[in-house]
Image (tube, rainbow, N blue to C red):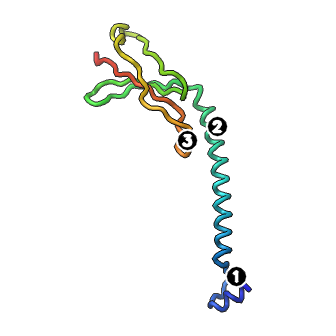
Amino acid sequence: SARIASHRAGHTGGPRFGCSDRMVLCRASLALVLLCAGSITAAARERMTQAVAPNFPIVYVVYGPGGVPLARAVVARGEPCPTLAPQGDISALLLSNVSVELRAEGTDVLPFAFPVRVCEAQLPRE
């Protein structure tokens, strides 16, 4: 049947699938890929959460427009922003008027899951 139809169309290779047969195979393959991708993504998200959680907060300083120093802290989503504390040569008076505010908050929505909060404070230049 498939071989006869193949010969009639001038094809000498193996059997050719009809359009409906290809659609069934295509849909089955797509379903398998989506099923595997979902389980891989969930497992990867679980590993990422376990690997990153103990390392919070991640604290760093960047220079914004005009060379203004900005202290940033990355914390787990749902955690409060940390407070600034003077260390070393920095006096408490320099930090007394500095407030820490939420800059961005991610979500667990895939494919770009980013379950953290980024906090920011503008530091004095002195």
Q: Which residue is mark 2?
A: 46
Q: Secondary structure at mark 1?
A: loop
Residue lying at 64% horizontally and 70% vertically, measured from the top left: 23
Residue at the spot of label 1: 15
Query: Residue at the front extreme?
Result: 20
Front residue of 78/64: it is 78
Which amino acid type corresponds to the residue marked 3 in the rendered image? Val
The N terminus, quarter of image: bottom right
Position of 8 with respect to 126 (left or right) is right
Q: Position of residue 18 (x, y in %)?
A: 66, 79
Residue 67 is situated, as x and y percent measured from the top left of the image, at 27, 27
Q: Earlier in the sequence, mark 3 or mark 2?
A: 2
Task: Name above or below for residue 76 compared with residue 23.
Answer: above
What whole-number distance in Å separates the C-alpha atoms at marks 3 and 2? 14 Å
Q: Residues within 10 Å of mark 3 (few under 14, many from 20)?
A: few
Q: Residue, x 56% and y 38% (percent of image)?
A: 108
Q: Is residue 63 above or below residue 4?
A: above
Snapshot quadrant of residue 14: bottom right
Amino acid carrying mark 2 in the image: Glu
